Amino acid sequence: MSLPTVFDHHSTAWLQPLAVTMPDMPMLAINRRAQCLAISAIAKKLLGELDEGLPREIRQALVEAMRTGKTELNISTEIHGAKRDFKCRLFYPQSGRRAIGLMVEEEERSLVDQLLHMQSIVHSLIEMSPDLICIKDHENRWMMANQHMLNTFQIDSFDYEFLNNRQIADTLHPVFRNSFEHHEKSDQQVWQSRQAYHNEELVHLPQGGYKTLEVNKVAYHDQKDQPSHLITVARDVSEQKFIQTQLLNRSAVLDTLISCDWMLHSAERWQSVAENVLQQCCLSFRFSRAILLQHETITSRKKTEIRSKALFHWAMNGFHTTYEHWEKISFLSPELQRWYGLLSKGQPVMCDALTLPAPERVLLKSHDTVNLVIVPLMIDEQWWGSMVIERCFDAESTSSQELGSLMAIGRTLSVAIDREQTGRHLKLAKIAFDSTTEGIMIVNTAGELVGINQGYTLITGYEESEVLGQKPQIFRQRPRGLFGALKRHGKWSGEIENIRKNGESYTEWMTITAVRNHANVITNYVGVFADISEMKRSQTQLNSLVNHDPLTGLPNRRLINHLFTHAIQRANRSEQQAAVLFIDLDRFKNINDSLGHYCGDQLLLGVTDRLRDSLRESDIVGRLGGDEFIILLENLHGKADAAQKAHDILDALRREFLIDHHEIFVGASIGISMYPQDGNDVESLIKAADLAMYQVKNNGKNHVAFYDAALSRDAVEHFQLETELRQALTRNQLKMFYQAQIDLNTGMIIGAEALIRWIHPVQGIISPAKFIPLAEETGLILSIGEWALAQSVRQAHEWHQKHPEFKKIAINVSGVQIMKSKFADTVYGILMESECDPSIIELEITESTLMQHTQHVVDTFNQLKLLGVSIAIDDFGTGYSSLSHLKRLPLDQIKIDRSFVKDLPDDKDDAAITSAIYAMATQLGFTVVAEGVETEAQEKFLQRLGCQTAQGYLYAYPVNSDDFLQLLVLNNQRKIKRHA
C-alpha cells in the first residue's frame, strides 16, 4: 500500500502549509516510532518506495532524536545497495500528539582528497614558473593556482579552492569582474571545441592602469574520453606592449616634427599655418587643446604686468577652449614667479596639475587640466610669447622626448615669426647655412648657381664643385608664374620633382626669394628646399588615420561630421529632406567573444560591403566605432523613403555571413532621424537617431524606429533627476521618517523602522521607489545610505536614552552598499561615533539581495554580528530562498511582506503562506514582524498565529523625528490612538 503524498489527514494537515511553501524540499510525516504516515512526491523520488517503511538505521536514529528533542541530525545508510548520506530536520507540533515533520536533504561527497592529490603533484612546478598558472577540474572549479596568478587578481590563497570563475569574481574587486566573465566564456569554448586557446587579453587593475596577458588554455580528457581538467597559462607581456607603443609614438613625433617644420618654412605667412601646427602637436602628442599667446608688458602707476593675447587656439571635439582664462592672468603675479623665471630664460614649464603648488594649481582648477606644457617663443633672446598645450583626458605625463620635440617646434615657430617680423633675410640665410638640414642655393640673375650649403649636398648628392655655374632644375623647368611672382612679390613657393645624383627621383618643396639691392634691383635669388617625399607619405597616412576608420576604411566620426554638415547644407539649399540612420549590430559582442576578434573584424568588413551595396553613390556611410555604423540619405521625399532603405539594409544584414567556415547570422537595430524635422545640425540628428536606435534595442532588436521627441524628454528627465539627486544630500532635501513598531501582546511601541524621504522643492515628496533605484544605478546610494544610517543610529541612541522601552530601530540597507563598500567598517565607525548600544540596531536587507551574493553576504553579516547588531530579511516571501541559504545566514528576524498581509484573513492562500512563513521562522529560531497591518482583523489573525510584532497604518503613519518623540511620550502615558 503506497503512502499518501499530500498531508491532508487531520494528524498531518499542520505540515501542509510548509509543503506548499517549499515544494522542492523532500518532506515526510512520521509518528513517535518513526513510522512514515505520508511522503511528498520529491521525497519519494529521493528515497524510493517505502513499502516496508524507513530503513532500520534511520528509524533508530530518528526515535533517539525525538526522545532528546533534537531538530537536526546526519544519517548514513544503504538504500537499494548504495551508501547514501542524508541531513535531516525535525519539525515538532506546537501541541497535541499529531504527526512530526521530517525534511531530508542528501549530502554530496567532497572532492578534497582528489584535489589534494593533484596539488601535491604539480604545486612545486607551477610555483617556480614566472607565468600565471591555474588548473581547473571538469566543472570549471579552481583546483590549484600559483602565487603569480593569485597576486595578479588579488585572490586570497585560502578562499579560491573549489570555486568557479563567477564565485571567485564575487569575492574580488569589481574591476576584475569583466576579466572573469571573459575567462568563463573562453573556458567553455575550450571544453566544447577541444582545441587549444590562444589570445591576448587586457586585465584592468584596481589602482589604475592595466596588464596585457598572453593567455593559453588547453583541456584534457581521461582514458574514457571524459572531461578531466583544464590548464590555463598566461604570460605578462605588458612591458613588451609598452615598448611597441613607445616606438609608434616616436614615429608619430618624427612625422609631426617634419610636418610642422615644412609648414612653417614653406608658408608665406606663419599665421596661415599656426592653427595647423597647434592641431598637429595635439593629435601627435595626445593633448586636448593648445593656445598660442603673444605677451605684452603693461606698466601703470601701481604695478607692471605681463598680459597675453591669444592669437590662435585649437581644441579636440568635446573640450572647451581656455584662451579667455590665459588672457586674464599676469605672468608677473606672485603665484607665477616660478613660471616667469623659467619662461623668460627660454626654459619650458612642464608639470602635472595635481603636483603643482597650491597657488599655481588654483589657476587650472576649473579647466580639467591634468598635464600642462608651456613652450616659450624667443625672438632675439627676448620672451615674445608662449605655446600652451594642455592634456585633459588622462594622467599620462609628458616624456623628455616629447618635450624636446615641442621645444624644437617652438624654435621653428620662433624663427618663422622672427623672419616675418624683422625681414632680415640675410641673417636668416646665414643661420640656415650654418645649421639647417634643408637645401639652400644662391642663384645669380642669369639663373646660375653661385653657392650651396651642406644640406643641398645631403639631399641631392652633388658637391659644390659639381654644380657651381649650372642652372638648377627649377630654373630649367621655369614653372608657370615663377618669375612673375618673384617680380611682383619677391617670393615663390611650390612643389617640384627633381633627381638625385644617383638617379633617384624625389619631391621637394622649394621656396625662392628675390634679393634686391638698395636701388630695389634684383641681384640674386635664394632658394630653400626640403625633401618632402617621406613627409608627403607620412602626411597621407596621417590624414587617412585622422579621417578614416583603420579597419573598414569608412569615414570616422571626425570626417562624418564634416561630410554630414555639407550634405545638410545641400539639403537646405535644395529644400530637400535627408535622413540619418544609426545602425547597431545585434549579437556582435557574443560573436566577437566566442569566435575571436579576427572573425569579428571579418564580420565588420562583410557588413561594410553590404551597406555599400545597399546604398546609392550619393549616400554617405561611416563607422562610429565598435559595431556602430551611421548613414546619411539625401534627396528624400519623406519618411517612407528612409524606412524603405532601412528595411533593405536589414534584409541585406539578415543573410548569413560565411567567415572561416562559420555560418554567422547577425541582425541590426536601426534608429532614424529626419532633417529638418528632428534637428538642424549634425550633432542633434545623430543624437536623435541614437535615441531611436536604443528604443529598438529596448523593444526586442532587429527592427527600425523613427525618432520621437518623447524619447529625448525621457532622457532629459532621467538626467535632470540624477543631477538633482546628486545635490539633494548637500542641500538638506533628504529627511528621515520613522514608523512605529508595536508589540502585539501589549500594544506598546517597542521600536521603529527608519524610512528615507526626498523633499523636492518643486515636485514635493518623491517616492523612494523612484529615486532609490537611480541612486543604486549611479553609486550615490553609498553616500546616501551612509548618511541615512548615521542619522538613524544617532536618533535611536537619543530615544533609547530617554525612553528605555524603545528597544530597536530597523534600518534598510541596499545590496549595493554591502557589495561595493566595506559596510561592516562603516557600521562600526558610526556606532563608535554615536556611542549607540549595538543591540538596538537592526539592519534590513531584501531577500533577493541575500540570494545573489550569499558568501559575501555571510562574511559581511558575520562581522556585523560580532559588533552586536541584529539582521533581518525584509519583504520575505517575494523572492526565492532555500533552507540551506537561510541556515547559513546569521539572521535574527523575518519581516512578512505587506502583499501577504493586506488580504488577511479572508484570502486563504495568503493565510496559508503567512502561517507557513511564521512556522518556518519559528523553527529556525527567528522572530517575526508583520508589516502593512491596516485592519483589526489582520491584527487578530496575526495574534492568533503567535506573531510578536507588527507595523502599519493601523498604529501609526511614518512621521519625522519630533512627531515620533511625541508618540513615545504618549506611549508611556498609554494614550496612543490608532489611525484606523
Image (cartoon, grey):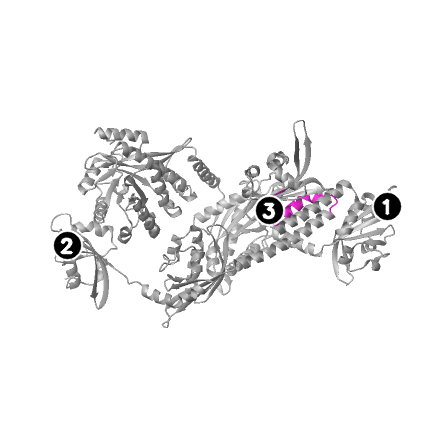
Report the magenta stretch's main SS. Answer: helix
The numbered mark, 1 or 2, whose residue comes first in the sequence reads: 2
**Cα separation between marks 1 and 2:** 124 Å
**Residue at the spot of label 1:** 522
Q: Nearer the viewer, mark 3 or mark 1?
A: 3
Query: Is the N terminus in the top left, top right, bottom left or bottom right quadrant?
Result: bottom left
- Most extreme residue toward the bottom, as rendered? 223
**SS at circle 3:** loop
Counting residues from the start of the chain, the first of labels 3 and 1 encountered is 3
The crowding category of the residue bearing disc 2, from other C-alpha atoms within 10 Å (few below 14, some 14 to 19, many at least 20), is: few
> Quick one: 313 or 549, which is closer to the camera?
313
Nearest-to-viewer mark from 1 and 2? 2
- Mark 3, residue position: 287
Q: Which mark is residue 858?
A: none
Query: What is the span of residues highlighted in magenta in the rendered image?
Result: 266-290
Q: Which residue is mark 2?
A: 68
Question: Which structural element holds mark 2?
Answer: helix
Left or right of 437? Residue 196 is left
Residue 466 % position (x, y): 83, 60
Front residue (pair 360, 73): 360
